[in-house]
Each structure stands twice: as structure tokens, then as C-alpha cells.
Image: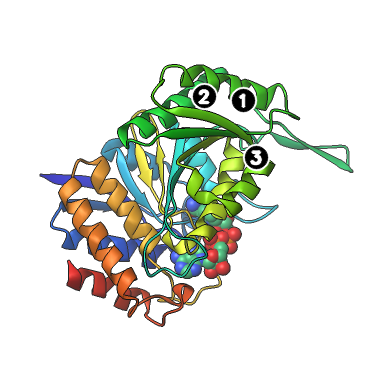
Amino acid sequence: MTYNITLIPGDGIGPQVTEAAKMVLEASGVEINWEIVEAGEKVIEKYGTPLPDYVIDSIKRNRVALKGPVTTPIGIGFRSINVALRQSLKLYANVRPVKSYKGVPSRYKNIDLVIVRENTEGFYTGIEHMVGEDAAESIKIITRKASERIAKFAFELARKEERRKVTAVHKANIMKYTDGLFLDCVRKISQEYPEIIFEDVIVDAMSMKLIQTPQDYEVLVMPNLYGDILSDLAAGLVGGLGVVPGVNIGEKEAVFEPAHGSAPELNSNMANPTATILSGIMMLRYLGEREAADRVEKAVAKILKDGKKLTPDLGGNAGTLEYTKAIIEIL
Ligand code: NAD
């Protein structure tokens, strides 16, 4: 069987890391017909938008995409392509598995948790404006529908992966209506999963607990902004953004992408492609290609454990291509 998959190379290090993932996935033996579509800074001049309609159309057609990071200007300029993509395709769940791999320099061992972030509302609705010249207002939206949907997703994931505990992360002590509603919804859904332990932790305390005892957590479910922040924090626990994959999932489509950004300051061939390759492995599992996914993950784990060919962010001096070829050789 040949899979049609949309590939969005993205900006900065995006083209290098997605090319690396493409090479590794092809070496796995799974037949993929890549439909390469460009989005991001480089298409603005031609199409007048960083997210042309043909990108959305391609994902809708193929239903599965692998995406590199794209640059979003801070404070000024166009709105985030990521936010627009997630909202237009209703990719409501952002999933980031955070896992320790032997050989990756990090402060902790044996971390294996998943961050499930609500992806369509919270503080990322883009409803923001100035109030006069000296004040600005941003509106946070939490709905019962989106909160129950993400809670269900988190519990289903826990059940499927045989994980024992789901932790809701919130700030309901201060934001009693918005986060209060989110917490109520997760609590209600938790009752449908009696075999799974449910607890809730306030986001500031969670930041400390993740640093102190990250091994205590399995599935963390939270609104958009907290998920964005805590998933980068969690990446720091297992060796950095270069090794954390992710996916944005909706009712119909799934867009796999590394947790990191476009790292525009990195020289070419210095990027660690592991996060994008691991995103590709998640994609293979999503497609039902479990055996190929396991094989590729074993090859990645071996190269990391050997430690002879690591990229500079992990303390080595191998370039993106050299590291990628080493994985392919093991495969
Ligand atoms: P970033 O993730 O690009 O970089 C943060 C740090 O991690 C930098 O020191 C960078 O060098 C390092 N890093 C990240 N990925 C790496 C990799 N694969 N290998 C080695 N080192 C890596 O975050 P940032 O600097 O805050 O953002 C840069 C741009 O990326 C911004 O325009 C931002 O909006 C965008 N961004 C995009 C996405 C996405 O497309 N999903 C996600 C986050 C940020």
C-alpha cells in the first residue's frame, strides 16, 4: 500500500529536519508518495499569505501531514500559521510524548509522559485588541465542548497506551469560570474511566513538580497556553527540543510535527532531526505501520545510546545529514 502524505518543509531548519525524516521513513520500507507543499515566510510574496489554500486542501485530501516548523514574527506581522492551521482544520488535540532515551544528556532518567494540550481555544483564539493607547486586552475562551473533547482524548490515549494516571493542569483557583469549567469537564469525563487514576494540579505547582519528580506523571491534560509552556519545559527534562515529537489531531486530519520551532539562528546542517524523525514514527503508528515504526525507533534509540554520532545540541559534532545517514545504516 502506498500512502499519500502532505509534506510541509517550513522555515529555518524545517527543510533540513523534514528531509531527514523523509529519508529515514523511506528507508523503513513503507511506501509513501509525498505531496510537498510550501507554507511560511517564503510564500508570502507569491501568495500574499503564509498559509495558502492549497496547503489546507492538500492536508484535507491526504488527511495526514508531516510538517516542519514555521517562523512567526513576534509582536508584529502575520498571525501564527500554526494557530491558523490548527483552527481551520479543527486539530483540537496537540500531543507531545516526552520520553528519556539512553545516551541523550539530560538531568533525569526514565521519564515517559505525554502532554495533551487543547489546541483550538484558551488564550490562542487571537481575539486581542488595544483599549485606548495604554492598555491591551486578550480574550480567553473555554467551552464545555472543547474541554470535554480534549479530556476524552486524554483518557482514551491513557487507556490505549495502558497508562495508569491522568493529571489535569489548570489555574481554576484564580480563573474560576474559564479554568473552573475546564476542570469540571475533565472531572466529569474521568468518571467514565474508573480504571485510570485522576488528579488535578494547579499549573504553577505543576511546574515545580515536573522539575522535582517528573517520573510521577503519565498523561497531563491542559488548556492551550499551559500546554505550550509545559511541553517545552518537559522537553528540557529529556534533553531539549531536538528530541520531542508531536502531532496535532482533529476529527479527520493529523499533522505531525516536532515540538521545536524554526531555530533561525542555527547554521544549516546543525539541526537535530530526531524530533521530526520521532514525529514520523508517530505517523507510522497512526497509519497502522507498527512494525516499521518499532524498527525505526529502535534504530534511533541505538544511535542515541551509542553516542558516537550525536548532533551539537546533544554534545556531539555530527551534522544533520551524517546523523540521518547513520540511522539509515542501522535500519
Ligand atoms: P525554537 O524551538 O526554534 O528554538 C529554541 C532553542 O532550541 C534554540 O536555542 C534552538 O537553537 C534550539 N533548537 C530548537 N530545535 C532544535 C533542533 N532541532 N536542533 C537543535 N537545536 C534546536 O524556538 P524559538 O527560538 O522560540 O522560535 C523560533 C521561531 O520558531 C519563531 O518564529 C517561532 O514562532 C517559531 N516556532 C514555530 C513552531 C512550529 O512551527 N510548530 C513551534 C515553536 C516556535
**Which residue was labeled with disc 2?**
146
**Which residue was labeled with disc 3?**
203
The residue positioned 24% from the left and 48% from the top of the image is 284
Q: Is residue 265 above or below residue 58?
A: below
Label 2: which secondary element: helix
Q: Which mark is residue 142?
A: 1
Decide: few, some or many residues near mark 2? Use Cα within 10 Å; few <14, some 14-19, many ≥20.
many
C-alpha gap between disc 3 and disc 2: 19 Å
- Assess whether mark 2 and mark 1 are in contact (beta carbons under 8 angstroms): yes
Residue 140, image quadrant: top right
Quadrant including the C terminus: bottom left
The type of residue carrying mark 2 is Ala
The reply to whether residue 176 is in sight is yes
**Of tags 3 and 1, which is closer to the observer?**
3
C-alpha gap between disc 1 and disc 2: 7 Å
The type of residue carrying mark 1 is Ile
Is label 1's Cβ within 8 Å of ligand 1?
A: no
